[in-house]
Structure formats: C-alpha cells, structure tokens
Image: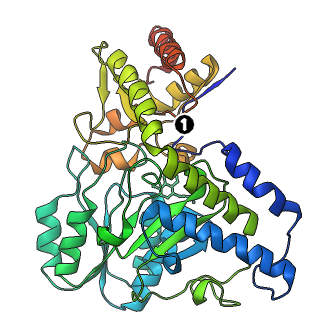
Amino acid sequence: MPVYLDHNATTPLHPEALEAMQPHLTKPFGNPASVHRFGRAAHGAVQRARVEVAELVGCRQDEVIFTSGGTESDNLAVKGAAAAQPGRTVLYGATEHPAVLEAAEALRETGTPVEVIPHSADGHPDWPWLEQRLGQGDVGLVCLMAANNETGVILDTARAAELAHAHDALLHVDVVQAAGKIALDFAGSGADMMALSAHKLFGPRGVGALILRAGTTIHAQMHGGGHEGGMRSGTLNAPGIVGFGAACRVAARDIAERNVHCRALRDRLEAGLQQLSDVTIFAAGQERLSNTCQFALHGYDGEAMVMAFDREGFAVSSGSACQSEHGEPSHVLLGMGLPRDIAKAAVRVSVGPDNSDADIDALLSALARIRETPMAAMA
Ligand SMILES: Cc1ncc(COP(=O)(O)O)c(C=O)c1O
C-alpha cells in the first residue's frame, strides 16, 4: 500500500464529514436560498455548519463567509480590502502562499502599490522593516500567514495585528494550514480577516471560508444574487459546507490528540534525518506545525527525490503542490534568503493521524536507498 505523507497538499475526507454530507448529496437537495421546505432544510444545515466553523476559529457566526476554498478566500480578502482603500499600499510576506502573493501581484498590475515584507532565514518577517514601513502611514493592508505550508513555521500574527492597527492598516491572516493544527481565536487575535480551506482539515475540496470581522469594510469580488450578506454571490455548496462544518467539529475535538500523534512521528523522522551529515531541516529550531518537516538532501534535486520516493511507494512533495507543477525552486525558501541549490533540493513531508511509526521508519529506509542511487542527484 502506498503511504500518504502529503497532508499539507490535501487530506482524506474524514468519515464523519462524509457521513454528514451524504444525505445532502441526495436529500434535502434544496437551494439554501429558497423559501420552501426543501430550501429551508438546506439553509438549516448550512447554518449549523456556520456555527461549527465559527467554533473552531473563535469568531461570530455572522463573520463566516462561505467560499470555494482557500484561494478564493485569500483573493476576496486581498482584492476586497484593496478595493475599499484605493491608493493605499498592500504588504505581503515573502513566504505567503501564491493565493495571497498572486492576488497582490495582480493588484500591482492595475496600479495598487504593493510591497513584499522580507523574511529572515528562520522564516519570520523582518519586524523592524515592517514597523518602519507601516510608519510611513500609507499602508492599508498587511498579509501574513499563521503557519507556512512548506516549512510549517508558525508566525506571530498577534504582533502583526498590533503593528498594523497602530498604523491604521488591516491584517489578513491565511490560516489555511493552521486551522485544526493550532488553536485559533479570531475574536482575540486582532486579525481583521482569516482565510480557511476545508480540504486541509479533512473536509471536502472546493469549499472554504473568509472570516471577516464585523464592521470591517471590503468590496465583494463575486457579484450576483447577493448571497453571504452580499460578500460572495453564488448558490451555496450545501453538501460541501456541511462536510466542512463536520470537519471543523472533529478538528476542534481531536486537535490535541492529532498534535501529539503527528509531533511524535515528525520528531522520529527528524531524529533519523539528523543522523545524516548532508541534510538540512528548514527552520528546525522554530515553532512549527506538528505535522510538517521540510528538508534538503544536499546535492540532490527535490523533484527527482519526490519521484524517487513515489517509486518507493511514498507520497511526499518538494514544496507546495502548485509550485511542484512548475518545477521552480520554492519561493518560500528563496524568500527566507536560502541559496537556490538548497531551495531546489527541498522535500516536504507532512504527516497525518493515520500515519504510523512504521511509515516513518520505512520512509527513512527508502531515503537511504535513494541516497545510494545517482538518479536523484542533480545534473
Ligand atoms: C497556506 C495556503 N493558503 C491557501 C491555499 C489554497 O487553498 P485551496 O486549495 O483551498 O484553494 C493553500 C493550499 O495549498 C495553502 O496551503
């Protein structure tokens, strides 16, 4: 059986999420916006899911805007906030996911001033740079993620909120990888917006949410029937939303247990990697997601390693799934100032609750075999 160790790319649907969704794929099939009984049944299910999502992230239920996933939520936050503050600068971290980075870069093309917040080699933003830049008074939006999808580094977004608000700017936090892995408290976090995605926390693909603090003004990016308080038009994906809600409920219940399990596996892997002289574990000394390890085997090509692991029966990745498609070195590692050859050697292992000690031991044995094969070495 192939072993799946790529949970930061996507996760399997949790059985409780599937069970919750199943009736909504057939009956009640009504449109949640319809007033008849079919519609009311679907609406009720969506509202229950809204409460489950709100409980996981610590926000009010009327602050949840359902979307098609993390990418749409990030786009709505970045473009929507920029549109509400024309001419003000957007800042985003050098290690942000493309969903934030490319949304901001698209704004640059239409004349919005956009700048990148430099990061240090340990994965954290350059705080003095950020404070000094905010001090210029023209920044409308700061985007910093809660946890990085490649390295797993957990950022101090409370500090970012304090700085942003002291200078009249909004803070958008991408919590796509953090949700279900670290405790979130939107109400107390100071963030103005948070982006979530169901399929990273054992919910279905193609559904997510933007949490928007009550009273914060952004402009809708999807126009139509005025769903979700006018912030995101489009018939709600009721089965997906119900599955998302169930996945959030399970995550809130199981978060501590999952973390203990995943951390033990991740530490076992890193103990094995540390035996090797030619391995670098990125951001090793930093507070990171319990399930994530990104490392480089010096002189090897990350993509070739991923293929070699695949032949051995292990699904890992070289960085984010999107970047792998383009064969580019990780912008996250380049953004941390790491040399190109090290960034190109990156391999990410992200474990999940179904993985075992035996999976990690087998992966380390496969790595030992791969190291003996010249095929994975860089040309
Ligand atoms: C940090 C982060 N943000 C956003 C996304 C995009 O989410 P989705 O796949 O739901 O569009 C991802 C997915 O890889 C992610 O890791």
Q: Is residue 330 above or below residue 309?
A: below
* Image coordinates for residue 188, horizontal then vertical, percent: 30, 69
Q: Is residue 23 left or right of residue 145?
A: right
Q: Is residue 8 visible?
A: yes
Q: Residue furthest right?
A: 26
Q: Is residue 180 above or below residue 233?
A: above
Of 263 and 83, nearer the camera is 263
- Residue matched to label 1: 6
Which is nearer the eye, 2 or 347? Answer: 2
Q: Position of residue 110 (x, y in %)?
A: 44, 83
Q: Residue at x 37, y 42 (%)?
A: 289
Q: Which amino acid type is marked by label 1?
A: Asp
SS for tag 1?
loop
x and y percent of residue 316 in the render?
53, 31
Q: In which quadrant of the rendered image does the C terminus lie?
A: top left
Asked whether 84 or 87 is in front, the reply is 84
The quadrant in which the N terminus is found is top right
Q: Measured from the top left, where is residue 160 in percent x and y? A: 23, 67
Q: Residue at x 33, y 39 (%)?
A: 340
Using residue 236 as the reference point, say whether residue 113 is left or right of it. left
